[in-house]
Amino acid sequence: MSLELIGVSLAYLPGTPMSRTVLHDVNLKLECGQIACLMGRTGAGKSSLLEVMCGMMTPSHGSMVLDGIELEPRSGKQALRDAVGILMQSSERQLFAETVERDVAFGPKNQGLSSEVYLARAHAALAQVGLDPQSYCHRPPFSLSEGEMRRVAMAGVLAMKPRFLLLDEPSAGLDAPGRDSLYHILLNLRAEGTGILIVSHDWEEVEMLSDQIFLLSEGRIIAVGKKNEVLTDADKLKGAGLIMPPVVELLCDLKSRGLDLPVYSASPHYAAACIAKALGKVRP
Ligand SMILES: Nc1ncnc2c1ncn2[C@@H]1O[C@H](COP(=O)(O)OP(=O)(O)OP(=O)(O)O)[C@@H](O)[C@H]1O
Ligand SMILES: [Mg+2]
């Protein structure tokens, strides 16, 4: 089971003098049961790519393939909407209903489920993101804090139980417990077989979650691979306009000098432990 983009390009305002192509010949495969991370500098096209993947935008060229079947440009949009959930970059802007309950239940209700089932789904999703359904259900979304709004938006996506989940900088602005609970949810969803794509600028987050990494630069995928390959490739990172964290630079440097360092790490604590071990020094 997978969602695949083959040779996809995207132009905004096509056919007008303002037309701009922002994605060029993108090939990307998101597998079920995997977490992929998408990295790239501001304006690289990350959000645009997610919008194509969930059916919000139609590619100018190329094909979308869902579970091995190429999608028709028109009917394919519905298939994508059924299979793919998206948490947008400013997810609080996704909220629109009068109450939190209605907002979270909107997706599963539209899937044709009975009111008993869609309300149960909405309440379970709220609990999953750490919001007590009894306290929050009847509140207007716009009376919530930004962090609470993000959690409600996430609950709305989770309540639909999508097979593929796209998250645009989901941890930006969350506090530490909020991040932990997000990571816990994502790792559980991966174990249940959901295919997840996360846009992230956070190296430790990418290190912890990613099975695969895509680097996007000026609308082109310039590297694909596992963290040990992609995040230690200084040239590729530079090509994507990203700067290697100093701790990774240090590990790469020490490795090139012959120190036996088994893994890449952006975590200073973990890196320090690896270096101490490689030097034969046991920390007290
Ligand atoms: N609706 C639009 N109309 C025209 N151009 C757009 C539109 N939305 C985005 N763009 C342009 O497309 C390019 C990619 O934008 P996109 O939002 O996908 O980048 P991004 O990688 O998500 O950036 P960021 O890290 O800042 O969120 C940018 O040059 C942007 O100006
Ligand atoms: Mg963006």
Image: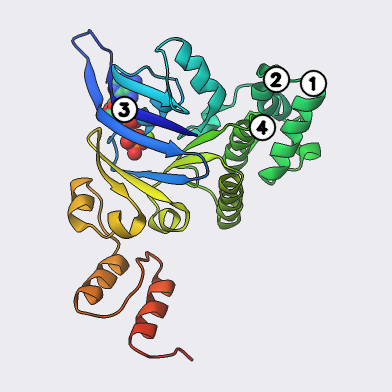
How far apart in space, not on screen, are marks 1 and 2 (Cα)?
A: 7 Å
Indicate the secondary structure of the residue bearing disc 4. Answer: loop
Residue at left offset 42%, top offset 45%: 36
N-term mark: 4 or 3? 3
How far apart in space, not on screen, are marks 2 and 3 (Cα)?
A: 32 Å
How far apart in space, not on screen, are marks 4 and 2 (Cα)?
A: 10 Å
* Colour mode of the rendering: rainbow
N-term mark: 1 or 2? 2
N-term mark: 3 or 1? 3
Give 148 or 56, whichever is nearer the viewer: 56
- Under mark 4, the amino acid is Ala
Q: List the residue tagged with mark 3.
A: 6
Indicate the secondary structure of the residue bearing disc 1. Answer: helix
Residue 222, percent across and down? 23, 42
Local crowd size for mark 1, using a 10 Å CA cut-off: few (<14), some (14–19), many (≥20)? few
- Under mark 3, the amino acid is Ile
Local crowd size for mark 2, using a 10 Å CA cut-off: few (<14), some (14–19), many (≥20)? many
How far apart in space, not on screen, are marks 4 and 3 (Cα)?
A: 29 Å
Q: Is mark 4 within 8 Å of ligand 2?
A: no
Left or right for 80, reference 17:
right
Residue 74, percent across and down? 43, 9
Corner quadrant of residue 82? top right
Residue at left offset 25%, top offset 26%: 22
Q: List the residue tagged with mark 4.
A: 159
- Comparing marks 2 and 3, which lies closer to the viewer? 3
Which disc is residue 109 wearing? 2
- Comparing marks 4 and 3, which lies closer to the viewer? 3
Q: Is mark 1 within 8 Å of ligand 2?
A: no
Q: List the residue tagged with mark 1.
A: 115
N-term mark: 4 or 2? 2
- Comparing marks 3 and 1, which lies closer to the viewer? 3
The image shows residue 185, relative to residue 20, as above or below, that is below
